């Protein structure tokens, strides 16, 4: 795997925004949006010593009649991280 490029503050902001979009798409693919009343994404980016660490906390408020479980949310998050890895490889590696 090639080395991560030196990231600027603008890069980190773009990465955070793009990861949010990836997460939203994956959640909507795995979970019916009709069953979700509110979706809160908290993306935490840590970039030190040329290492990028991205964590996410997903808060979902479900409709009272929803039968969505935690495994479905975790599947969406895992899918988003896989797509995010590809995004980083394509855009931020030498």
Image (cartoon, rainbow, N blue to C red):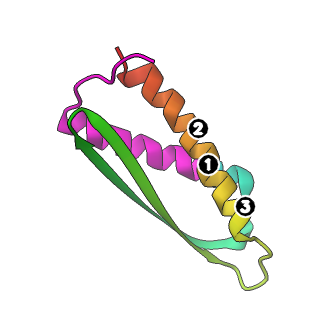
Q: Residues within 10 Å of mark 2 (few under 14, many from 20)?
A: few
Q: Decide which of 94, 42 is in the foreground and name it.
A: 94
Q: Residues within 10 Å of mark 1 (few under 14, many from 20)?
A: some
Percent coordinates x, y for residue 85 in the rendering? 50, 33
Count up the numbered dots.
3
> Mark 2 sits on what residue?
82
Disc 1 to disc 2, how far (Cα)? 6 Å
Image quarter for residue 14?
Answer: top left
Q: Quadrant of the N terminus?
A: top left
Magenta stretch, main secondary structure, is helix
Q: Which mark is residue 56?
A: none
Mark 1: secondary structure: helix
Disc 1 to disc 3, how far (Cα)? 10 Å
Mark 3: secondary structure: helix
Q: Are marks 1 and 2 in contact (CB under 8 Å)?
A: yes
Percent coordinates x, y for residue 6 in the rendering? 22, 25
Q: Earlier in the sequence, mark 2 or mark 3?
A: 3
Specify whether residue 50 is painted magenta.
no
Decide: is 40 above or below 3: below
Q: Which residues are magenta?
A: 1-25
Image quarter for residue 13?
Answer: top left
Q: Quadrant of the C terminus?
A: top left
Disc 2 to disc 3, how far (Cα)? 16 Å
Image quarter for residue 63?
Answer: bottom right
> Mark 3 sits on what residue?
72
- On screen, residue 78 versus residue 57, left or right, reads right
> Mark 1 sits on what residue?
78
């Amino acid at each position: 795997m090639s080395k991560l490029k030196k990231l600027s503050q603008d890069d980190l902001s773009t990465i955070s925004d793009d990861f949010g979009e990836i997460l939203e798409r994956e959640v909507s693919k795995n979970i019916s949006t009709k069953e979700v009343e509110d979706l809160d994404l908290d993306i935490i980016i840590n970039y030190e010593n040329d290492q990028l660490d991205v964590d996410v906390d997903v808060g979902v408020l479900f409709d009272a009649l929803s039968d969505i479980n935690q495994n479905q949310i975790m599947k969406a998050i895992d899918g988003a991280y896989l797509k995010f890895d590809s995004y980083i490889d394509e855009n931020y590696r030498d």
